[in-house]
Image (spheres, rainbow, N blue to C red):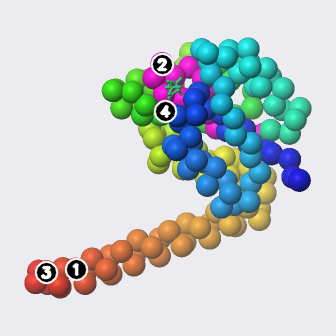
Amino acid sequence: MKKPVIGILMGSDSDYEVMREAARSLQEFGIEFEMLVSSAHRSPQRTLEYAANARERGIRAFIVGAGAAAHLAGVVASKTTLPVIAVPIDSTSMKGLDALLATVQMPGGIPVASMAIGKAGAKNAGLFAVQLLAATDADLAARLDASRTVMAEGVAEKSERLQQRLSADGLA
Ligand code: RP5
């Protein structure tokens, strides 16, 4: 079994549906990861120990999702100098704006890279982690380039289908 190089952390199992998108991005590029629940507020000791011990276990970056008064990414960052990529989760009536503001307003000296709120943010967090690893892995960088090409082709195909809809609607 391969060793995980990315640690995906979330504040509650209720965050899983969003954070699964990060796992999917990593899986697409064959990046090994581990995923666990740990809370900045409900299990602070577990969170601090995980962050402190991760580097020696082979982890090279963290993806951290939390909602509400989202302190998890910042707490992880306080115990490691590995990169921390945060995903604000839309789990309250404030629809993730609370988590976004709590996440991005880190004090100078302890950086956290925050993605967008929700599933797009989680997807990009996974891709961002791949990009970090690709900085020293030419094969991985080439596969990222290829995925961008496929994405661009997909946009062109959508445009083509749009022409067909325009025509069907009698607008072209
Ligand atoms: C946060 O509180 C978690 O990250 C989650 O987004 C939110 C709600 O958690 P649960 O009450 O669903 O466990 O800490």
- The residue labelled by disc 1 is 165
Q: What quarter of the picture does the C terminus occupy?
A: bottom left
Amino acid type indicated by mark 2: Ala
138 w.r.t. 8: above or below = below
Q: Secondary structure at mark 1?
A: helix
Seen at 77% across and 65% down, the residue is 139
- Label 4 sits on residue: 88
Does any atom of ligand 1 lie closer than 8 Å to the CB of label 4?
no
- Of labels 4 and 3, earlier in sequence is 4
Residue annotated with mark 3: 169
Chain-order first, disc 2 or disc 1: 2
Q: Which residue is mark 2?
A: 69
Cα gap from disc 2 to disc 4, whole angstroms: 10 Å
Ligand 1 is within 8 Å of the C-beta of the residue at disc 2: yes
Element at badge 4?
strand
Mark 2: which secondary structure? loop
Q: Is residue 70 magenta?
A: yes
Marks 2 & 1, CB-CB < 8 Å contact: no
Q: Residue furthest front?
A: 13
* Residue 84 visible in image: no
Residue in the foreground of this view, choosing between 141 and 45: 45
- Distance between the Cα atoms at labels 3 and 2? 48 Å
Query: In the picture shown, does residue 55 fall above or below 162?
Result: above
- Tell me how far mark 3 sits from mark 1, CA to CA: 6 Å
Residue 45 % position (x, y): 73, 14
